Amino acid sequence: MTSFTMNINDINQVKNYLLSLQDTICEALEGEEPKTRFIEDLWERSEGGGGRTRVLCNGQVFEQGGVNFSHVSGFSLPPSATAKRPELANRQFQAMGVSLVIHPLNPYVPTSHANVRFLIAEKENEPTIWWFGGGFDLTPYYPFEEDVIDWHRTARSACEPFGEDVYPAYKDWCDEYFFLKHRNETRGVGGLFFDDLNEWGFERCFAFMQSVGNHYIKAYLPIVQKRKAAPFGDRERDFQLYRRGRYVEYNLVYDRGTLFGLQSGGRTESILMSLPPVVHWKYNWQPEPNSPESVLYERYLKPQKWLVA
């Protein structure tokens, strides 16, 4: 891990970007809603830091969406951060980021998730350790291949200035990370995921995190605009609510961000804002052969190369 002397200007630079990103994303999503707006909730954490949670509920396009900024600090990193990184144990830390999940009302509009974050781990008389992480991924219910390809093209565009090998590596990492082992299926059609990034130096790593953050809306909004008016009925809604259960299973069992937040004494309401407002589970349900629902299972819930060139 690369280290360098972290100064307050570096930290503030990242924080100001993240606050601006939260504003930009909320404004873009609100632009799709005729009336509904985000409510804002400012909170503080007793051990250090706090955040700015924004939630949109019962919209005509988005049934529920949360866009959360947090900047927390503490005296030691939680087990989720140190399990594979013993050198981080007993270090003071700062963690800041923007995390969001958008659950649309129309089953033809995919759920989407994005997160960009910056962590600093410090110990007296030892070099500061820092890294960036994040990414974005798409979880459709009734997928359109052209949407999936466009999503990945935008993800690739976010990575291209940083090297030809970046998108393939972080695309594969996303497929591996957002995988429900107990279901043997991906959470959706992937996107980008990266973590522990600092080998390029601070400025270039920060620039990459910004590129990923800035490309999320570029990737998601065109899909929303194209599919939000598609007619649907009880069948599509029922399938959407069933598939949302996979999202809950993943977030509560595997997601590092959820585990980090809960283990570090974070604000529970903000951590769990990613969960959908309505969800159904069914015992041993299987899609009918050759049905629209079966397409998701047969074609989309497995890692694959969406961009051939």
Image (cartoon, rainbow, N blue to C red):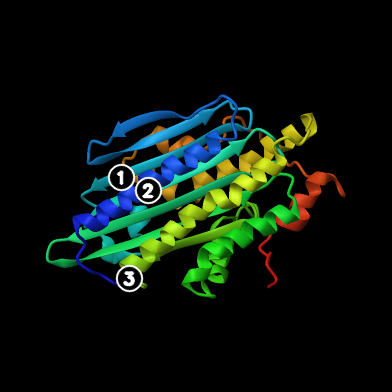
* Residue tagged 2: 18
- Marks 2/3 in contact by CB < 8 Å: the verdict is no
Could you tell me how far apart the alpha carbons at marks 1 and 2 are, in whole angstroms? 10 Å
Q: Is residue 131 above or below residue 25?
A: below
Q: Residues within 10 Å of mark 1 (few under 14, many from 20)?
A: many
Decide which of 281, 294 is in the foreground and name it: 294
Q: Is residue 205 above or below residue 145?
A: below
* Residue tagged 3: 201
Could you tell me how far apart the alpha carbons at marks 3 and 1 are, in whole angstroms? 22 Å
Secondary element under disc 2, as helix, strand or loop, is helix
Type of the residue with mark 3: Gly
Q: Is residue 172 left or right of residue 239?
A: left
Query: Disc 3 vs disc 1: which is toward the camera?
Result: 3
Type of the residue with mark 1: His
Q: Residue furthest left?
A: 125
Decide which of 42, 223 is in the foreground and name it: 223
Residue 273 location in percent, x, y? Answer: 47, 35
Q: Is residue 216 above or below residue 47?
A: below
Residue 59 location in percent, x, y? Answer: 59, 27
Of callouts 1 and 2, the N-terminal one: 2
User: In the rendered image, is residue 301 in sight?
Assistant: no
* Residue tagged 1: 71
Secondary element under disc 3, as helix, strand or loop, is loop
Residue 161 location in percent, x, y? Answer: 49, 70
**Residue at figure coordinates x 38%, y 42% from the top left:** 69
Of callouts 3 and 1, the N-terminal one: 1
Residue 137 location in percent, x, y? Answer: 57, 53
- Marks 1/2 in contact by CB < 8 Å: the verdict is yes
Q: Is residue 135 left or right of residue 231?
A: left
Could you tell me how far apart the alpha carbons at marks 2 and 3 are, in whole angstroms? 19 Å
Q: Which quadrant of the figure has residue 149?
A: bottom right
Type of the residue with mark 2: Leu
